[in-house]
Image (spheres, rainbow, N blue to C red):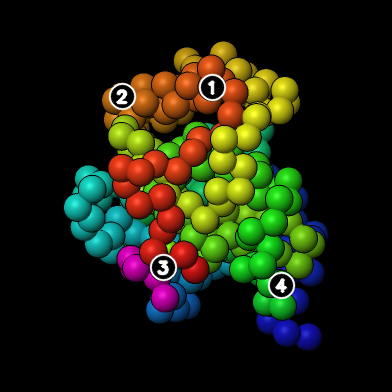
Amino acid sequence: MSQSKRVSSLMLELDPLSIVKSIATSEILISGRLVDASNATLFGKVISDTGVHEIPIIYKPIAGERPLWDFPDGDLASREVAAYQINKFLGFNIVPFTTLRDGPYGIGAVQQWIEIDEAFDLITFSQTDDFRLREIALFDAVINNTDRKIGHLLMDADNKLFGIDHGVSLHSENKLRTVLWQWRGMQLTEIEVGQLQKFISERERITVSLRNLITVLEVDALFARVSSLIDAGIFPEPSEEWPAIPWPPI
Ligand SMILES: Nc1ncnc2c1ncn2[C@@H]1O[C@H](COP(=O)(O)OP(=O)(O)O)[C@@H](O)[C@H]1O
Ligand SMILES: [Mg+2]
């Protein structure tokens, strides 16, 4: 049995709360660095609180963040966590569990690792009108994602789709950059509008949860985006003022 199959069959026996608790509190053991990552992105594991399971994780220490011209230094990890929280408040399960915590290289974002289905053709899939992609397109409009590449979509062996790498999102100026434009200008469904309205109605609680992650200006911009989505009733259209597709798109 391969290492990945062994890990995922063991994961089946672990309840989600135990996974979350272990990722948030157990010691992080690093085993490697992801070479295709643009920042210091480390692969490792934590041992479950029960002491028997290994939970694979990805750890992005703030100290390893590369400065960017259009985002403040040293806060990509906070944006990753803010994006996770927003995904939960929307009632979506797009982002794997992500938390901000201390690790061997200092404070960073720690996220549950998803074992992907290597045989799955994400490139073709990414341009379909699959409902799971549509949910991610709406999520990206909410978080103002500037980097929804095909490689930031993950399909696991149970056919569950995830979105990752939300460090460059939540800017106060509109910068939506994505490969998922297939719903541009299309009507939001009643369910989608309801999800956005519920988000607005929980503004106070959401603001508290984002308080130490993004600025007040960015929280205001988040709610302004959600309100304009509700008012417009449609998915955003690509802007002509900034590049609307990430480069490279994969
Ligand atoms: N939670 C995860 N589960 C599985 N693979 C991941 C996860 N997070 C990142 N990866 C893999 O690591 C690569 C680099 O991670 P990413 O979050 O894109 O880092 P960076 O911010 O450096 O671009 C991704 O393209 C993906 O292949
Ligand atoms: Mg990336």
Residue 84 in the magenta stretch? The answer is no
Residue at label 3? 248
Label 2 close to label 1 by CB (< 8 Å): no
Residue located 62% across and 68% down the image = 123
Q: Earlier in the sequence, mark 3 or mark 1?
A: 1
Most extreme residue toward the front is 240
Residue at the image position 62 percent from the left and 42 percent from the top? 183
* First of labels 4, 2 by sequence position: 4
37 in the magenta segment: yes
Locate residue 167 relative to residue 202 in the image: left or right. left
Q: Amino acid at mark 3?
A: Pro
Residue at the extreme bottom of the image, as rendered? 1
Q: Which callout, 2 or 1, points to the residue nearer the camera? A: 1
Q: In this picture, is 39 found above or below 214?
A: below
Q: Residue at x 73, y 56 (%)?
A: 160
Circle 2: element type: helix
- First in sequence, mark 4 or 1: give its number: 4
Name the side, left or right, on which 17 lies relative to 204. right
Q: Nearer the viewer, mark 3 or mark 1?
A: 1
What label sits on residue 216 in the rendered view?
A: 2
Q: Cα distance, mark 4 to mark 2?
A: 40 Å
Closer to the camera: disc 3 or disc 2? 3
Q: Residue 142: x percent and y percent?
A: 50, 34
